Image (cartoon, rainbow, N blue to C red):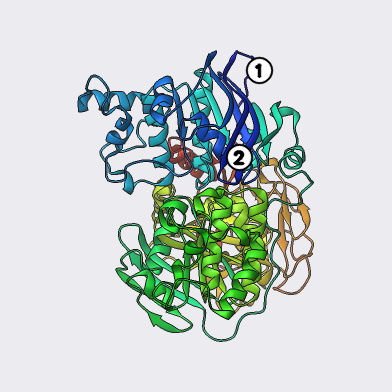
Amino acid sequence: MPHAVRTTRPAPALTATGIARRFGSTRALADATLEVRAGEVHGLLGANGAGKSTLSRIISGHIARDSGTLTYEGRPLDLRSTREALDIGIALVAQETSLAPDLSVLENIFLPELGRAGRLSFGQMRRRAQAILAGLGHEHVLPLDAEVRLLSAAQRQLVEIAKALALEASLLIFDEPTASLSPTEVDRLFDIMARLRADGRALIFVSHRLEEVFTITDRVTILREGRTVAAGVETAGLSQSDIIRHMVGRDLGAIHAAPRGPRPAAEGPPALEVSGLRAAPHVRDVSFSVRAGEILGLGGLVGAGRSEAAEALFGLRRRDAGTVKVKGREIAPRKPADAIRHGIGFVAEDRRAQNIVPDLTVRENLMLAHIGRHRGFGLGYGRRQGRLAELLEKLGLPENRLDTGLLTFSGGMQQKVIIARWLLIEPTVLILDEPTKGVDIGTRAAIYRILREIADDGVAVVVISSDFEELLGLTERVVVMSDGMTIANLPTPLLTEEKLTLLAAPRSSTGRNRALLDSLAQAHDGVAFWALLDAQELICLGQSAAPGAPGIGLRIGEAVRNADTAIATALRARADGFVAEPAPGPQPEHGADAASALLPARAAGAHAGALRSAGTDIPPDAHARRPDGPGAGATGAPPDHGARSTGAQGASPGSGAAGASGPGPGPDTGLTTLLIGMHTARGHDLGWIGLTLRAGRPLPDPAEIRRQVALLTASDPSSGAAS
């Protein structure tokens, strides 16, 4: 959502001029300049290795500068520690949090105050923490007594922000804060940042996601190779191309991956097959398979259990139930060495805590996956040496720095080293959790390229990502998880970001929709469902059936292509929805009960009173038949405003004729389905609520269903109202 920027120009809160810093022979900063004002969000941009994190760490007291000047609130600044920075009100909300995992949320918020003069009681701490969170609009989000290790990434980030505010910080540096957040969580973070800006605080926002830069920042400063190349430019006056050109010194094509074309199915059993996986408390029922040469996406919101499922497959988390097969052979990895032995590699989400040994060199980190598999620690294996040289070239890793400490490299370069480590063992399956988290545009493109190349070489690739655009561009299929369960497994071409968002919505947050479905199904002795519906297919998000109700052929998370059915359908467009009925005549082998699962084209213009079916506009309140096959015509007829609907008389399926123009008194022909469109207060499509009854039963008044939907969703921010 857009967040209004400020237009006032207060005095600078912080000024950095001519900042330089070296790490051994590596020049991280050469001539960096930055001016941040109170009451603004200032974007700090640049490619990986440009010096953003180094400058942020200098400003926050983590490291010292070699030369240059810093002033803060008009006074010269010479920080020697993070404690000094915190004491004057400068705090860093890091990409990888510095929280104590075994302490509670409350203890972490006030951890920096330990050792200071005076002492806070737990009662005082609790009241202050509640006040801080209330000021951020999140007083009910964080369980103050929970251990931090049990929190989601978004919750841990909120703890970091609360910790900074407990110290009354007036300058907050957000270093890649959205790297592993879902779109909803990003929006919440931006709401918090907007509140902090309105409160007069200065915020530095470090990010590689340009769409977010345009959403939240007032001005930007861009670094390239340690130098400032654009200083304090108004964001509103820039284009995405302008920023990219400053960052990399040249025009760059598409930021996100281009869609991967269809691939022939690999012969033999899947490279990885997972069935009924459980790993308490976060993984409840996960099933999917991926074939050699396929790139599979694992989508969902943070907290859906995706990372935990991957950890269970890699032996990092105890598996309570389910089967795991690699190339048709069942395995039971109890530790990572077991998974590695069976050809599974895993790039975890938390780069520093789970993927690297910070004190080791690049070469030593590359060899971690080989420990226990081969003698020695060197690269003295002819094939592996050749493979290493090939990978270094592909990933842009400098061979002459293999014996340099890994932490001297940027986060993007570290990620390349982690991926290269697994590629050296030539895995059967490579699972990557948020592989482009916190990396720049060029590194992201390099990672996409290498994943496609290894898939072309026959590796099965599983990508976990909260970036839905990334999933849609990189993968061939997407498995969606919610509340620890796989709830959809669909070809990528059938999906959009909107559909992924709806599928990924926590089932626990849609309890009101489930209550509505249960109520409708029981009250009308039928089947109620919630679905996405467009001109190509229907995807069921949830359903409820009364005892003895007819089956409608829908499974949650599965797509049914409208164009694949030979069932002709009569449509009665209405101002407040439309009715879909099976036409009379012979039905397909699966019977009339499946007819309503194969619904007609979505009323894309229903809100405006028009229905599009098979490429033909149908006027509002018209009755029409859609014969078999795309491109068939439709004829209008006088509207039927009654709630009762019977089967239409006319041409049989596949006849190609428009058929009769109105309902007749003929026999009961199967099922009748009423669809009611839903949308949020902002106009975003939430799909359709459907009610399927046996033909001849009275349909409820759509207006009454609307009232129920509005009542049930009015106080649920995750839902919307009927359209």
Q: Residue at x 59, y 46 (%)?
A: 25
Report x, y in % for residue 339.
41, 73
Residue 2 seen in the figure: no
Q: Which residue matches tag 1?
A: 7
| Quarter that holds the C terminus | top right
- In the figure, 582 relative to 349: above or below? below
Instruction: Please rate how many residues cluster around mark 1, counting C-alpha atoms within 10 Å: few if below 14, some from 14 to 19, many from 20.
Output: few
Nearer to me, 596 or 475? 475
Say whether marks 1 and 2 touch (CB < 8 Å): no
Local secondary structure at mark 2: loop
Give the residue type that dot 1 points to. Answer: Thr
Which picture quadrant has residue 594? bottom right
Q: Is residue 327 above or below residue 351?
A: below
At horizontal 78% and vertical 65% (from top left) the residue drawn is 632
Residue 674: % across, % down: 56, 54
Crowding at mark 2 (Cα within 10 Å: few <14, some 14-19, many 20+) = many
Q: Amino acid at mark 2?
A: Gly
Q: At 47% from the left edge and 39% from the top edge, which residue is drawn?
A: 94
Q: Secondary structure at mark 1?
A: loop
Which mark, residue 699?
A: none
Where is residue 129 drawn, in percent x and y?
32, 27
> Residue 74: percent from the left, percent from the top?
55, 13
Q: Which quarter of the rendered picture does the N terminus lie within?
A: top right
Residue assigned mark 2? 51
